[in-house]
Amino acid sequence: MNEMAGPTPRSLREAWVALAGLSAVFLFEMLDNSILNVALPVIGRELHASTIALQWVTGAYAVVFGGLMLAFGAIADRFGRRRIMLIGLVLLGVASLATAVVTTAEQLIAVRATMGVAAAMTTPGSMALAFRLFDEDGLRVRAVTLISTVGLIGLAIGPTAGGLVLEIVPWQALLLVNAPIAVLAFLGVRAGIAADDPADLHRDPLDVPGMLLGTATIVLALLTPTLFVDEGAGSWAPWAATAAAAVTAICFVLRERLARHPLLDLKLLALPLVSSGLAYKAATGLATAGLGYLVTLQLQLDWGWTPAQAAIGMLPQVVVLIAGSVFVNPFVQRVGLDRAAWISAAAVVSGLAVYGLLGRFGYLWVAIALVLVAAGMRVVGVVAGLNVVRGLPANRTTIGTALVDTATEVTSGTGIAITGTILAALFTGDIAISHWSPQQTGEFHQAVTIAGLTLTTVAAALVGWGIARTRYAAGDQAAAPLDAAVPQDA
């Protein structure tokens, strides 16, 4: 049996302590908004918040988080991934404790924006630090699988746990819980991960104009889908935001091509493993957000299910996301990282196609679509991001993981924008009314089919590009399976 590469026994123990801390970071990211959504009606009543204010309670976090990830990824690659993560965890703990003294919606929005800054400081470094804990790809897969499983469990139980907690304690407790999570993550990362090796960092000057243009581009890209859904395609606002996003994106690209020390070296995007991993993650983000949006509307508005019944209807996805962790490592060992990435991404596209073509004919087809997308997403979530990191130079890994998270955030918003715009264009009247006319039901079915197939086409194009890049990276040779000596008990 080959000797397994990786940490010594002592450092292996430290690595698992670090993984506990990194898992806590991802738990915060996945649990936060899911558990908060349950409390929005209570928050609205107690803080006398308007509908727009409530929207920004969650929106402020998402926009700040998505907009700053690239900037903090670049900062971490220069000044230390561990250092930036620890600072972010302190900020997260302080912001969480500030919830206890919130008395207005505006104060809560400020707290949520601060949490978004903390998330942007901590999330990109999670994958980079997990990658550096181990020298062997099999152990890296197991580590990332563990981290993602903890987060997905938080995503799954968040709404139920939040509802139960609200029965006995004030809503502030739902955000105060982030403080002990931040403490756990801080202790795990500090004890289990060594200080950054200067050799793994770089000292290029910060590209401040690039940071500003990149942040503006992503913020506008995240705001635009919300404007399309809220204002409709007939309004000038979403189109103005789209134009502004395009202009800032062009300026960002020009800046990065001309800058001596760019925020993001665009040549990195041409690396085959990087471009393929980003394509797979983008396809998955597009599919997951768009499918979730459509299925939620279909179950409750078209089929008349109650919210509780709709939650049960989404269980196939939840079960696969959580239980699928035991299959990720054996699957990757069998087929290899590169092949696992494109097979799982293709499963996501297949699920979208099933829903777009057959979803309106009964719940069985909806369940099959949910299972296929969840199964594909479960694997892509581990291996595509890992491919991006292993395809980058050691001193650019955090900006790479920031790219992965940013691609997911932006394409998730794009998926909702596509579905929302098609629904707005084809459905006449108020979609939220209790009873639809036969004409409205037909319009909804037509919109679901068109939206589902549109998402399928875009996602398939992204996956096709990813496959082409993977084959280019491998010299048209199938990726070799991981070493058989990797332990099988992941």
Image (spheres, rainbow, N blue to C red):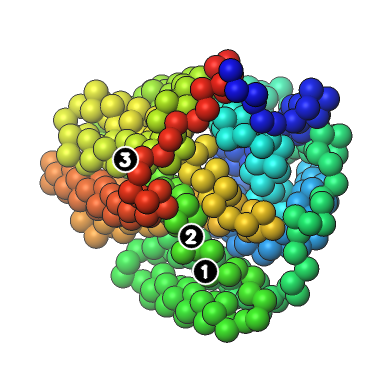
Whether pointer 2 and pointer 1 mark residues with C-beta atoms closer than 8 Å, the reply is yes
Residue for badge 1: 267
Residue for badge 2: 271
Picture coordinates of residue 96, whole percent (x, y): 78, 43
Occupied quadrant, residue 17 = top right
State whether residue 31 is above or below residue 309. below
Q: Nearer the viewer, residue 358 or 297?
A: 358
State whether residue 171 is above or below residue 318. below
Image side of residue 486 versus residue 128, left or right: left
* Amino acid identity at mark 2: Leu
Within 10 Å of the Cα at label 3, are there few (<14), some (14-19), or many (20+) other Cα atoms? many
Within 10 Å of the Cα at label 1, are there few (<14), some (14-19), or many (20+) other Cα atoms? few
Quadrant of the image containing the N terminus: top right
Whether pointer 2 and pointer 3 mark residues with C-beta atoms closer than 8 Å, the reply is no
Which residue occupies 47% across, 79% down? 250
Within 10 Å of the Cα at label 2, are there few (<14), some (14-19), or many (20+) other Cα atoms? some
Report the Cα–Cα distance between label 2 and label 3: 21 Å
Q: Nearer the viewer, residue 459 or 217?
A: 459
In primary-sequence order, the first of circles 1 and 3 is 1
Q: Nearer the viewer, residue 235 or 224?
A: 224
Which residue occupies 56% across, 21% down? 485
Quadrant of the image containing the C terminus: top right
For mark 3, give the secondary structure: helix
Report the Cα–Cα distance between label 1 and label 3: 27 Å
Examine the rendering and report whether any part of residue 311 can be seen.
no
Query: Mark 2 or mark 3, which is nearer to you?
Result: 2
Residue for badge 3: 346
* Amino acid identity at mark 3: Ala
In primary-sequence order, the first of circles 2 and 3 is 2
State whether residue 238 is above or below residue 18. below
